[in-house]
Image (spheres, rainbow, N blue to C red):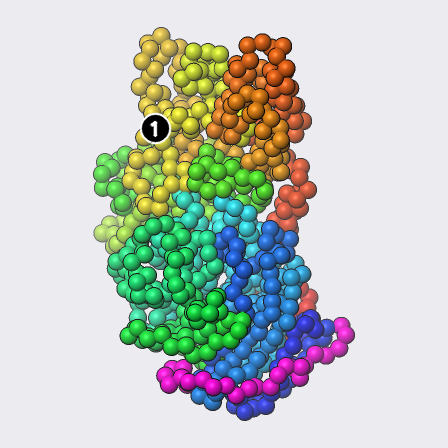
Amino acid sequence: MLVRLSAAIRLLLFGSACLGFCFSGPTFADGTGVVTGGDLPAPVKIDVKAENSLVTAQPIVFVARSQYPGDHHNTATMFQTGEINTNKFNGPSAIKVIDFARGRLWTLLEVPGGVTRDIDVSYDGKKILFSMRLSREDDYHIYEIYADGTGLVQLTFGSGITDIDPIYLPDGRIMFSSTREPKYCMCNRHIMCNLFSMDADGANIQQIGHSTLHEGHAAVMPDGRILYDRWEYVDRNFGDAQGTWTVNPDGTNHAVYWGNNTNSPGAVLDGRIIPDTELMICTFSSCHDRPWGALAIVDRRLGVDGREPVVRTWPADAINLVGKGNYDTFKKVNPKYEDPYPLSEQFFLCSRMTGEGERVGIYLLDLDGNETLLYAEQQGCYDPMPLASRPRPPIIPSRIDLRKNEGYYYVADVYVGTGMDQIEHGTVKSIRVVESPEKRYWTSPAWDGGTGQQAPGMAWNDFNNKQIIGTAPVEEDGSAFFAVPADTFVYFQLLDNRGMMVQSMRSGTIVRPGETAGCVGCHEYRRGSVQSTYESIAMKRTPDKLQPWYGPSRLFSYTAEVQPVFDKHCVSCHDYGEKAGEKINLAGDRGTVFCTSYAELRGKPWINVPGAGPFKTLMPKSWGSHASRFVKVLLDGHGDEEIDRQVKLDEESFDRIVTWIDINAPYYPSYASAYRNNPYGRSPLDGGQLKRLAELTGAKTDGRSTAFSFTRPEVSPALAKFQDKDDPGYKEALALLQAGKGILDQRPRADMPGFELVDQIEIEQEAKYQARLQLETAMREAIANGQRRYESEDVRQAP
C-alpha cells in the first residue's frame, strides 16, 4: 500500500530532457485527493560555469534551505516537537538538482513550510534518501524518492521523534540517527540522537549505538565500516569530547578514529574517507556553534589526536588553530564550510559561505588551493552530492545474536598502555565495569560547578551519575575475559588488591548481544594491532560473570552508599558543634544542593578527582583514592593513637569510600528532580526564599556552602550571626530553614529515601522512554525470530 503523505509536499513532474529518464508522476493519498508535481516550476536554464569533468559528468543533487538557527550546540538542529527549542524551526526547503554540463536546474521536491536535509544517493544512483519535516507541528522522518522525482515513500514514523542523517548501507539496509531512545545533553537540556538501522522498506528498526549523548553524520567507509561523529563525556569536560568513531553496520566494534582527546576543534563532523586514500576529509567545528567551521584533511596514520595528523585545512590558516584555545576556537573561522564530499583525491564538493552574510553556496575545492563557487541561491545550498552510481563497499557480516542479553569483553594485557609500564606486574587484581547512564530529565534552573551547567545539579563538578555493574578478575599475565550486559554504555577501571583504582577509562564502550570485543590494554596504541606471542590465561576459559557490588546493580547514591559509613564511624566527632567538625564535617544534613559531608569533602578538598576534567589521558594513580588525602588518613591514621584505636573501618566501609572516590565522586543517583523550578533543580526553597535567607544571615546559599542544614535547622552555622534567639531576623531565618525541612519531609528529593517522580513533565518523559523501550524490545524479538515488524501499518508494498 502507499504511504500517507501530507498535501504540503509538492513534487515536480517534467520530461525526459533533464536526466534522460522517462518520468511519470508520483501519486499520494492524503485523504483529500491526489497531489502531483504540476504545481512546481519547470526546469530552468541557468548560467553556470564548471569546467571540471568530475562536476560536469553527472548532475549534482543538493538541499536548498536556510542555515539552522543558532542554538546551544552544533547538535541542536532538530528543534523537535515538545522540546526546549521547538519554536526555532522554520522552512521552507527543497531538494534540487543542477546539471552543470547542460546549465539546467530543477526541483525534485519542495516543502513550503518545512525542511528537507541530509540527502544520500543510492549506490546505483537511482534513489535518494533524506530526512524531511513538513512543518513545525511535524518531526523529521526518513523518506526515499527516485532520482526522477517519482515514488516518494515515507519510511519512519512517530510523533516526538527525530530521524535524521540517513545513509544507504552496502547490504541494502539503511542507517540513521534518531532520538528514539529519548535522552538529553548532560551539560544542558537538548534532545540527543543515537545510531539506528532498519531494512530498506523501514522494517526492523534497531538501535546500534548507545553512547550517552549524540551519534551523527554517519558515512560508509571503503571497507564497509561506518565513520560517524560521537559526542560523549565520561569524567571529562563537555566541550572537547566530540570526535570521529567507527562501527560495523551491525553496531559491533565501536572504536575511536580521530579527535576524541583533542581540545580544539571542539567537534569533528561530516567525516568521509577520500577515495583511494587513507585520508579523512571532515568539518572542524566548535561546541557552541552551528555544524560548520573549517574543512580539514586528516591522516590517521600519523596519530589519532592533535596537530600532526592534520595535513591541510580550508581556510589554510585554520590549521594553526588545531590544539590551540578551547572547544569554541573554530567559531572564529571565516569563511565557514560544511558538508564536504570528496570527488577524487584532488577535488572536493562542499557548502561554503559566499561572503554575503550566512548565505552558503556549492563550492569546488582542490588541493592546489583553488575554491570555485559553482552555484548559490538566496536560501543556501547544502549537502551537495553527485546524482550518479558509485562503488558499493563490501558487506561486513553481522556478528550479533539478538537472542542473547550479554556480550563479552577480552583484555589481552592491562599493563600495556599509557603509563601502565610504570605499574608493577601483579598490581592489578580485578577490573570494574561501570555504567554511565543516560540523562532522561532536565530542569530549567542549573547548578554550575565550574565546568558547565548541570540541569539539575548532579555532582560537585561533573555531569554523570554512575551504576556499578560488577568486577571480574585479572589474571597474573594481565589478561581478563568477562561478560557484560549488551547494549549498555560502560567503562572499565583497573583495581588493586585493596579495590583502589589504578587506572580508569574516561570514555565509554558497548558490546552488542553475542559480540566478543577486545583490546590490547588500557589506553593502548590505537593505530594498529598488537600481536600476542602467547595464549593468555583468561582466554583458556569461559568468560567470567561479573561479581556484584554489595547487592544488585543500582544507580549510585552518595547518601545511600557512603554516608552510612560516616554516620557509623565518624559523625560522633565530625559534626556541627564539635571541634573535629570544624576541620571536616561528615554529617549527612541536607543543604541547598548536596549534604554537608559531600560539600566538605569536595570543597576543602579532601579528595582528588577530575570531575569534568581535562581532555588529555590521565596517568595511572594520578587521581582517585591513591591521590586523595582523605584516603591517606584512612590508611595511615589520624595521628592520634587513641582515636585510631577507637575508629577502625571494616573492609566494606573502606571499600565504599574508595569506590565512591574512584568513580569520580558522584552524588545524585538520578537526573529527576522533586523541585524542577527551584534553584539548581534541587533546593526545597524557591529563589525568593533563598535570597531572603542570604539577606538575613549574610551566608551564601549556593551548593558549596555548609552554612545551612535543612535536616537540623537549629544547628545551621549561618544562624550563629544572631546573638539573641528572640531576634526577629533569627526567627525568620529559622522559619525558612524549617520550611525547607518540611518540604523535604513531605516531598523527598533524589538524595533521600522515598524519592519518586512527582513532576508531570518528568512523569511524561519517563512514560515516553519506557514506551520507546518496549517498542525496541518488540522489534528485537521480531528480528531474532526471523520476523518483519513495522512501526506503522502504512508501509509500501515491495515492488
Q: Position of residue 482 (x, y in %)?
A: 40, 44
Q: Position of residue 770 (x, y in %)?
A: 62, 48
Q: Position of residue 109 (x, y in %)?
A: 60, 76
237 or 688, nearer to the observer: 688
- Residue 243, placed above or below residue 201: above
Classify the position of the N terminus by image quarter: bottom right
Chain part drawn in magenta = 31-57
- Residue 180, placed above or below residue 649: below
Does the magenta-highlighted stretch encompass residue 36? yes
Amino acid under disc 1: Ser
Q: Is residue 32 left or right of residue 721?
A: right
Residue 435, visible in the rendered structure? no
Q: Secondary structure at mark 1?
A: loop
The residue at which mark 1 appears reads as 628
23 or 493, nearer to the observer: 23
Which secondary structure is most common in the magenta stretch?
loop
Q: Residue at x 45, y 19 (%)?
A: 585
678 or 524, nearer to the observer: 678
Q: Residue at x 48, y 38 (%)?
A: 448
Q: Residue at x 56, y 91 (%)?
A: 16
